[in-house]
């Protein structure tokens, strides 16, 4: 064999060995570069891939496969909050919750109609306290009145069948959005005058500011004379929540409330103007 042929064969062998070595080394290097997965991550991948039926869903699973389950839940919640449609739905549900007052008021009207002659009942929606939810006034004008408010999912019966129109009680007025009731009453055929201002407090109860004074003159020969004098001696004067206060304290309270007890022009009569059927239709 010629020397040149032997050299050629040796060169070819070296090239083959070099190629084989390169392939083997390349495989080893690529294997080392791959990121090993923990057992937990493998379980996540296996579990999530089991339920996937299309490529886009599989890609989503693979992208989240290295995220722990608790973090993944947070991510899903974050995506929901960033969805404007989801946020709008939340707001809509809040608005629906706010309108629950209508259902409650219908129940109240139905119950009152069962106990009283509905032909004599009038009712209305007013704004008594300082919020944007209407309040329900219902009663028989000249005889009795009730007042309900809806707040934080609860109904409060502020006035329950308060009688008026007889025995010197002229009726009740309210100052809109201030939660204030004004009432002038008298006793002993007008011989004793009673001015009452009721102020709704944070407990949805009334604080009472009262002024009891001498009213119409009464003759000494009148059978009521002695009783009138005794009652005035015991009750005449000013009080706040059943505690006696001075005239100055009374006037200061009126100033604080921006109330002139002799001027009812800023108040409205507490009574309804609709039939129960009309108001229930409005509420439905």
Image (spheres, rainbow, N blue to C red):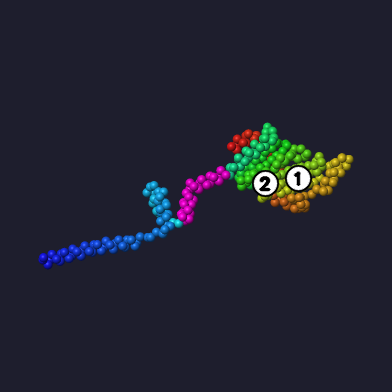
Q: Is residue 60 visible?
A: no
At numbered mark 2, what does the secondary structure look like: helix, strand or loop? loop
Q: Which residues are magenta?
A: 69-97
Report the residue at 72% width, 46% height from top: 197
How many marks are shown on the rendered structure?
2
Kindly identify which residue carries mark 1. 195
Q: Quadrant of residue 108?
A: top right
Q: Residue at coordinates 67% horizontally, 42% vertically from top-left?
A: 147
Q: Is residue 98 above or below residue 122?
A: below
Position of residue 137 relative to residue 251, above or below, is above
Mark 1 vs mark 2, CA separation in Å: 17 Å
Q: Quadrant of the C terminus?
A: top right
Q: Where's residue 113, x and y in %?
A: 67, 35
Callout 1: few (<14), some (14-19), or many (20+) C-alpha neighbours within 10 Å?
some
Mark 1 lies on a secondary structure that is: strand
| Residue in the image at 17% along x and 65% along y | 10
In the displayed structure image, the side of residue 144 where residue 26 appears, left or right: left
Decide if residue 164 is in sight here. yes
Label annotation for residue 237: none
- In reply to whether residue 71 is colored magenta, the answer given is yes
Quarter in which the N terminus is drawn: bottom left
Residue that lies at the very extreme toward the right in this rendered image: 221
111 horizontally vs 9: left or right: right
Rendered location of residue 137, percent (x, y): 66, 40
> Residue at label 2?
179
Assess whether residue 107 is covered by the magenta stretch. no
Residue reaching furthest to the bottom: 3
Q: Quadrant of residue 157?
A: top right
């Amino acid at each position: 064999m010629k020397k040149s042929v032997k050299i050629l064969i040796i060169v070819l062998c070296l090239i083959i060995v070099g190629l084989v070595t390169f392939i083997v080394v390349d495989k080893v290097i690529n294997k080392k570069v791959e990121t090993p997965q923990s057992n937990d991550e493998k379980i996540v991948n296996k579990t999530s891939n089991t339920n996937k039926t299309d490529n886009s869903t599989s890609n989503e699973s693979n992208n989240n496969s290295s995220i722990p389950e608790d973090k993944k839940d947070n991510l899903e919640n974050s995506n929901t909050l960033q969805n404007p449609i989801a946020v709008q739905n939340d707001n809509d549900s809040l608005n629906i919750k706010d309108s629950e007052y209508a259902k409650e008021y219908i129940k109240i009207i139905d119950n009152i109609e069962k106990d009283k002659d509905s032909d004599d009942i009038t009712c209305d929606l007013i704004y008594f306290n300082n919020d944007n939810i209407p309040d329900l006034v219902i009663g028989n004008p000249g005889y009795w009145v009730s007042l309900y408010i809806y707040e934080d999912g609860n109904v409060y019966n502020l006035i329950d069948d308060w009688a008026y129109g007889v025995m010197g009680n002229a009726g009740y007025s309210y100052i809109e959005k201030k939660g204030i009731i004004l009432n002038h009453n008298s006793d002993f055929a007008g011989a004793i005058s009673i001015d009452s201002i009721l102020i709704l407090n944070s407990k949805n109860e009334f604080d009472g500011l009262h002024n009891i004074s001498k009213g119409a003159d009464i003759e000494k020969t009148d059978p009521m004379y002695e009783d009138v004098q005794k009652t005035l001696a015991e009750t005449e004067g000013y009080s706040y929540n059943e505690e006696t206060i001075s005239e100055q304290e009374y006037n200061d309270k009126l100033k604080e409330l921006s109330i002139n007890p002799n001027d009812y022009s800023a108040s409205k009569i507490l009574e309804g103007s609709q039939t129960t059927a009309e108001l229930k239709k409005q509420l439905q």
